[in-house]
Amino acid sequence: MSKQNEGNKKGSVTGPSYVSWVDMARGGAITLVVLGHTWRGLYSAELISPGFYRVVDNGIYAFHMPLFFIISGFFYFSHLPKLDLLHRGLAVTRRLLIPLVIWTYIFLFLRVLFSDFTNAKPDFNSLLVLPFPGILHFWFLWALWLIQIGLLLVAALLPRGRRGDFLLVISAVLVTALWANGPILPFQSILGNVYRYGIYFVFGAFAFRLLAPAVVERRGLIFASVIFLMLLGITLVPDISRFWATILAIGLSVSFLFGIKGLSVYRLPGLRALQWIGAYSFSIYMMHTIFSVSARALLLAGGVTLLPLHLFVGIFAGILCPIFASLLLARVGGGRFLGLQDRPPPSAS
């Protein structure tokens, strides 16, 4: 047995492989996404008081999407020197853009079909829209695709030997300039989220270099937790500037990731479940609102207005139902076409 495996068995600070804690981080991030959308849906259904709603909503939306972009950027630059850029671009398009188109119309059709049970009341005219630049929650896929394709174009201008650290530095300068000038740059409807979130994607590569070798012992875990809670308190400050909102999002994300890595060395059942959820994060992201909205509609139809029950059922349905749907679709051969995972990757097994 290797030392690392011994560490895993004993729960020592050597902990699981980096892939394990990254899957756990994905699991935590997607859980926050499901919580955020469920929370906003319950507010729209008038089940939450405005004051309580704002406290929780501010905390979640201060960092949960920056966190997703940061995690998405963890491994991006490390593989570029070894990859054919054209094939990489086609793979990114297959992975992000095609599912974006398909799922956009699936969602729009379902919203029309079940309009009587949703907060919005769309009709069939709402299907007559282009899927770009990403409507509903699919704006994330559009922005992530554009960021990766844009960085591939930058990489194509460099010799293969400069597609490592040099490309990372060039990309950091580029996305920082885009972020700084984002509000005044053109094509906001198409590129606005690229200007806003590209900086987090590239920061993810730097963050992983910081986090991967880090050994987060108990004191470090406590420190990360305290910092995270303190930063959450700042989210209650009204009218925070754009600069400080970005710094806050990075601080919350990094302390969250340090906390996940610190917890990952302990053999806790909940963390194993979080790792499993993280392995299906893409499937959950694509489908979670279908099931969380359905759960809310069914509970309300049954006269249930108890907030904790709505929250629990909405999150439970939004996470587990997409996983089972993904596995079911894989059996009939449609999962990969829809961009869904058909089984957990080796890191979650």
Image (cartoon, rainbow, N blue to C red):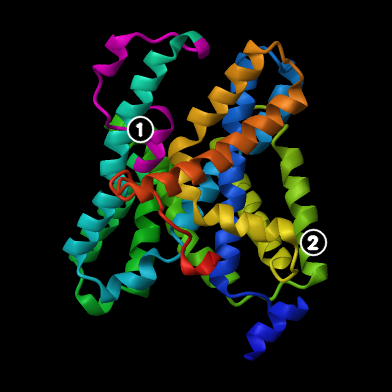
Quarter of the figure that contains the N terminus: bottom right
Question: Which residue lies at the image location 79% right of the left edge and 61% below the top edge?
Answer: 223
Residue 181 is at least partly visible in this image: no
Q: Which residue is mark 2?
A: 223
Determine whether, in the image, residue 134 is placed left or right of residue 234.
left
- Residue kind at label 1, given as amino acid type: Ile
Taking the view exactly as shown, the residue that stands out farthest to the front is: 332
Q: Earlier in the sequence, mark 1 or mark 2?
A: 1
* Residue nearest the observer in this picture, 103 or 59: 103
The residue positioned 69% from the left and 29% from the top of the image is 311
- Badge 1 crowding class, 10 Å Cα cut-off, few under 14, some 14 to 19, many 20 or more, is few
Q: Is residue 97 left or right of residue 242?
A: left
Please name the residue that numbered disc 1 is placed on: 184
Cβ atoms at labels 1 and 2 below 8 Å apart: no
The picture places residue 200, in percent across and down from the top left corner, at 47, 51
Q: Is residue 197 in the magenta section?
A: no
Left or right: residue 150 versus residue 51 is: left
Q: Position of residue 305 (x, y in %)?
A: 73, 15
